[in-house]
Image (cartoon, rainbow, N blue to C red):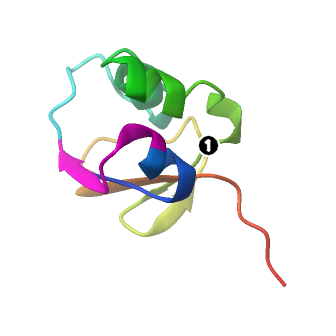
Amino acid sequence: MKVKYFAWVRERIGKTEETIEPPPNVRTVNDLIAWLAGRGETYAYAFEKPRVIRAAIDHAHVKPDAAIAGAREIAFFPPMTGG
């Protein structure tokens, strides 16, 4: 699956996107965040406060407990404000 990073998540990781293949036990957005955080220092820094990270699966905003099975693209970004 393709993972995209936005705003300070992207800046901390140092990538705009990448293609990953998480292990079978990674089933939800929360699981994916925890798995990504374990991939190294930059990922750990980007996901150090997982509760503030927002996610979208295939361009639809989802909750942290959303299943990732079948996802083509998952995007991670900080909270947004509107105006």
Q: Quadrant of the C terminus?
A: bottom right
Residue visible at 43% across and 50% down? Answer: 10
Of residue 26 and residue 52, the one placed in the foreground of this image is: 52
Displayed quadrant of residue 50: top right
Which range is magenta?
Answer: 12-19
Q: Work out whether residue 1 can be spotted.
A: no
Residue extending farthest bottom: 83
Dot 1: few (<14), some (14–19), or many (≥20) neighbours within 10 Å? some
* Image position of 36 (left or right of 18): right
Left or right placement of residue 60 versus residue 54 in this view: left
Which residue is located at x 33 percent, y 18 percent? 40
* Residue at the disc numbered 1: 53
Total number of numbered discs in the rendering: 1
Type of the residue with mark 1: Ile
Mark 1 element type: loop
Front one among 68 and 73? 73
Compared to 44, does 17 lie above or below? below
Residue 19, position as x, y percentages in the image = 15, 46
Residue found at x 55% / y 50%? 8
Whether residue 60 appears in magenta in the rendering, the answer is no
Residue 81 position, x and y percent, is 79, 69
Q: Is residue 72 above or below residue 69?
A: below
Q: Nearer the viewer, residue 2 or 65?
A: 2
Does any portion of residue 74 appear in the rendered image? yes
Q: Position of residue 48 (x, y in %)?
A: 59, 24
Residue 1 percent location from the top left of the image:
19, 48
What residue do we see at 20% from left, 48% from top? 18
